[in-house]
Image (cartoon, rainbow, N blue to C red):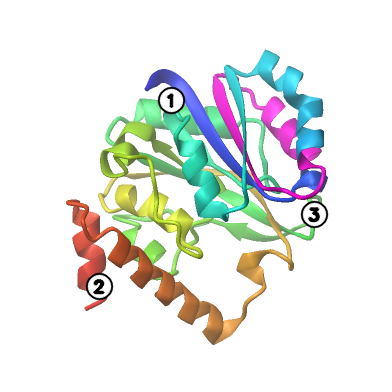
Amino acid sequence: MRKDIVSIVVPCYNGEQFVGQFCDTILKQTYKNIQLIVVNDGSTDETEKELKKYEDELKSVLTEYIYVKKENGGQASAINAGLKYVNGEYLMWIDIDDLMHPYHVEKKKNYLEMNPDCDIVRCQGYEFGENDFQNPIAVMGDEKVVGTLFEDILLGQRTCIPGLYMVKTEKLFEVLTDRTIYEARKSQNNQLLLPITLADNVGFIEDKLFYYNVRSASYSHSWKGGLRMRTRWDNIYDIKNSISFLHHPYVQTIHNLLH
């Protein structure tokens, strides 16, 4: 892994209307040693055209900009495509319709550098409704957690919105040795966070550095109540079965929780 580089994987499907504001939030980061990997997951709109407008500027400002185009396969499939290119010491993944405070990357990278016992750091953030980034409707990640986040994330008691987290790449790839997560219908964030949150080494930054765009049309907000919870448990069982061959404590912990 390249020292001091922060890799950011961005899965994108039909994100034409969000490309401009997302590229702006990346270009405004105070920390520029970023490897940005955008994966176009078979978009049918003008996503590629909009990204092309920013290509030269992204390449001139950041350490590296990589654009990957593939057939539509879902968010987990897009993340897998992006993980193959990751070579930074630190790793984030974020949706293209979300935004970051200008100090987001810098503060998280500095925290992990100054706290070598931590493999992952979490910040606070704001939720905004339907692309209105002027009026926050809720605070995210507003509690400092003592101990592991593993069970809270697995059971849906703690948000696993990816923009709140940054991880040490090497630690994640110790588990995901082939840089591949199971392409479940959902729960891709769980698969990336759970291997690292099992240990008692989660850092916390009391700053609201992430702005989450809550869209009613998005997958995570389109299902209600029992159906949504049943789907969560179905996905957990799918993941358990798919990773049963991995020799890692977090696999056994999932098994124990489900039996």
- Horizontal and vertical percent position of residue 94: 58, 44
Count of marks placed on residues: 3
Would you identify the image quadrant in which residue 33 lies? Answer: top right
Q: How many C-alpha atoms fall within 10 Å of the one at disc 3: few (<14), some, or many (≥20)? A: some
Mark 2 vs mark 3, CA separation in Å: 37 Å
As for residue 193 lying within the magenta part, the answer is no
Q: Which residue position is annotated with label 1?
A: 87
Mark 2 belongs to which amino acid? Answer: Leu
Height in image: 256 above or below 5? below
Disc with the residue nearer the chain's start (3 vs 1): 1
Residue at (44% x, 19% y) in the render: 4
User: Which residues make up the magenta segment?
Assistant: 19-47
Along the polypeptide, which appears first: circle 2 or circle 1? 1
* 3D distance between C-alphas at marks 2 and 1: 34 Å
Position of 219 relative to 149 (above/below): below
Q: Is residue 229 left or right of residue 36?
A: left
Which residue is at the front of the view, 223 or 246?
246
The residue closer to the viewer here, 183 or 122, is 183
- Indicate whether residue 29 is drawn in magenta: yes
**Residue type at mark 3?**
Asn
Q: Is mark 2 on a helix, strand or loop?
A: helix
- Which residue is label 2 attached to? 257
Quadrant of image for the N terminus: top left
Q: Position of residue 15 (x, y in %)?
A: 75, 48
Q: Are marks 2 and 3 in contact (CB under 8 Å)?
A: no
The residue indicated by pointer 3 is: 131
